[in-house]
Image (tube, rainbow, N blue to C red):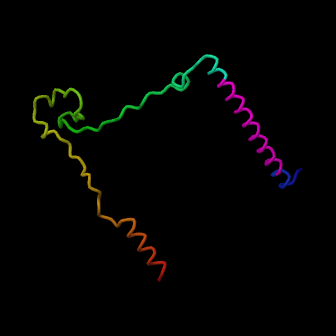
Amino acid sequence: MKSLKELLAERAALDEAIVQEKKAAAAQALSQVHTLIAEFGFTAQQVFPWKAPKAHVPGKYLEPKSGATWSGRGKPPAWIAGKDREQFLIEQPSAAPRQDGPYLAELAAEAARGRSR
């Protein structure tokens, strides 16, 4: 039976061989991909098709009976069409940052004072 040292050395050698073989296989695969792209004239969009993700717009108006919301964009739904939109507004959070906790600089100053004592 092999010693722990010998087994660990074999494992390290195998890990290195795996890394080297993986690099060689990746280089060969990339070369083949480049050859096929050049041969057939594929574009990046054809090789890697993608669509820009649609931006989700949160609801601005709420219909209390059904719980339906409307962002305020596009054609208004029947429940809000021709009515005063103010009564359907969803409470929006204020843009001002909350200030009910200490600032990061204050925390750092307190920590520095604690270290110097």
Magenta-drawn stretch contains 26? yes
Q: Residue at x 23, y 33 (%)?
A: 70
Residue located 84% across and 55% down the image? 5
Comparing 20 with 10, the one in front is 20
Question: What is the residue that sits farthest to the right in this orientation?
Answer: 1
Depicted 88 relative to depicted 97: above or below: above
Q: Nearer the viewer, residue 38 or 70?
A: 38
Q: Which residues are magenta?
A: 9-34
The residue that appears at 81% across and 46% down in the rendered structure is 13
Characterize the magenta stretch by its predominant secondary structure.
helix
Q: Nearer the viewer, residue 39 or 72?
A: 39
Residue 77, by quadrant, is top left
> Residue 88, percent across and down?
16, 39
In the rendered image, residue 63, in percent from the top left (x then y), is placed at 18, 35
* 71 to the left or right of 4: left
Inspect this view and state whether residue 63 appears. yes
The answer to whether residue 69 shows anywhere in this view is no
